[in-house]
Image: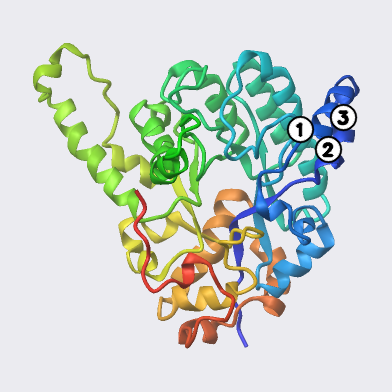
């Protein structure tokens, strides 16, 4: 009756809206009350009767155990104070919004640190920062490290029309330096970084078509700007944005970078190319990993393109597109017939190494609730009724 240890590298949590108030500085309470009174939540999953899965610690632990998961990396989900929408998809604020937005993120970080401390061996919380003010961002990085949010920092969305320097600008080096010094992972989650599309009939369609591409940009922004040359111990994790695109992106970077390095740039010769210490794809090997939410069988079969030790399975709890409450079945569908050491790495070992989980501490719980090794090896006979995650689709939908 051997069982796998399962760590979800992509889960989401946050406080109920008005429960953020005590985590704000008192000088912001009146502004918060006014904002909360007029706020209309745009997210369907936060309007459901079971929205308490985001903050009810006891319920959450029970849900995860029933799903075969013993630990989680925690991204934000609910809306922090003074934000029009969730922190995952919000763009960098304008100057006149910065003070309140920053106060709202810091309230979330305080709440998250306290909430993770209720089960510290099972939760790796990811703190939030803004890049508008470098000194404040560095201060927040150190606060995140000092308060046990070992999930690292969430990279804020920096679309092309943001009022700050782009990710490939050296302006942000002090932030990456602080992350490296404190051993914090930089996490880029899908859904962020898109520009404003305006109030047009096709705006939603345009966003859906392009959001994945904008979410992918941190990979080549960090690689091609030499961030990993300057900060070789820094780690970048790309979460919930597919898997198959990575190998193509690395190949594309290698191909055109070889031309740049050789000076074969034709009419672009007037531009002085920025040269790296290694080929772009080599930085994937040393500095990057992927949080493969609801990993599909098709992507699992192509795992060697990225390297098994770079892939971390995620359930995406409590999102509706995630595998819960059928994660055990999803794992069986994805990993059937895959060698056990590789399954162990993708389900827990890699996440433990990246985020500092203690597998020995988690082992007794995993021995009670984890998916059975034999069940995973046998695969899935039929998709459970009610399972809607892309992990159960017949074939993986390509990601832009």
Structural distance between the alpha carbons of marks 3 and 1: 10 Å
* Residue 284 relative to residue 351: left or right: left
Structural distance between the alpha carbons of marks 1 and 2: 7 Å
Q: Earlier in the sequence, mark 3 or mark 1?
A: 3
Q: Which residue is mark 1?
A: 81
Disc 3 versus disc 2: nearer the observer: 3
SS assignment at label 3: helix
* Residue 64 relative to residue 205: left or right: right
Q: Quadrant of residue 265?
A: top left
Instruction: Give percent across and percent down for residue 245.
Output: 33, 51
Q: Are marks 1 and 2 in contact (CB under 8 Å)?
A: yes
**Could you tell me which residue is drawn at 72 percent across and 64 percent down?**
361
Depth check, front residue: 237 or 184: 237
SS assignment at label 2: helix
Q: Which residue is mark 3?
A: 33
Depth check, front residue: 259 or 75: 75
């Amino acid at each position: 009756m051997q069982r796998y240890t399962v760590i979800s590298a992509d889960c989401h949590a946050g406080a109920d809206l008005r429960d953020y108030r005590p985590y704000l500085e008192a000088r912001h309470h009146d502004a918060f009350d006014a904002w909360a009174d007029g706020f209309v939540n745009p997210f369907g999953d936060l309007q459901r009767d079971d929205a308490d899965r985001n903050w009810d610690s006891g319920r959450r632990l029970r849900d995860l155990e029933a799903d075969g998961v013993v630990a989680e990396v925690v991204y934000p989900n609910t809306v922090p104070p003074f934000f029009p929408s969730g922190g995952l998809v919000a763009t960098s604020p304008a100057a006149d919004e910065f003070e309140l937005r920053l106060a709202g993120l810091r309230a979330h970080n305080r709440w998250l640190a306290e909430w993770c401390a209720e089960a510290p061996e099972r939760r790796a919380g990811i703190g939030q920062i803004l890049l508008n003010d470098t000194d404040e961002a560095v201060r927040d990085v150190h606060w995140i490290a000092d308060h046990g949010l070992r999930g690292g920092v969430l990279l804020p969305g920096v679309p092309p029309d943001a009022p700050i320097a782009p990710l490939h600008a050296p302006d942000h080096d002090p932030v990456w330096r602080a992350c490296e010094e404190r051993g914090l992972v930089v996490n880029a989650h899908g859904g962020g970084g898109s520009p404003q599309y305006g109030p047009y009939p096709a705006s939603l369609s345009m966003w859906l078509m392009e959001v994945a591409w904008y979410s992918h940009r941190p990979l080549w922004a960090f690689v091609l700007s030499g961030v990993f040359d300057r900060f070789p111990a820094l780690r970048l994790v790309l979460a919930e944005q597919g898997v198959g695109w990575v190998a193509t992106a690395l190949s594309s970077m290698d191909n055109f970078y070889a031309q740049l390095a050789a000076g074969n740039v034709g009419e672009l010769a007037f531009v002085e190319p920025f040269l790296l210490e290694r080929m772009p794809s080599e930085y994937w090997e040393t500095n990057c990993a992927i949080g493969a939410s609801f990993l599909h069988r098709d992507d699992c079969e192509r795992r060697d393109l990225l390297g098994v030790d770079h892939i971390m399975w995620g359930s995406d709890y409590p999102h509706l597109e995630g595998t819960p409450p059928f994660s055990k079945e999803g794992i069986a569908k994805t990993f059937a017939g895959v060698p056990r050491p590789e399954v162990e790495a993708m389900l827990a070992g890699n996440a433990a190494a990246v985020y500092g989980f203690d597998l020995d501490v988690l082992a007794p719980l995993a021995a009670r609730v984890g998916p059975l090794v034999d069940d995973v090896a046998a695969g899935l006979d039929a998709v459970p009724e009610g399972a809607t995650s892309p992990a159960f689709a017949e074939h993986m939908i390509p990601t832009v």
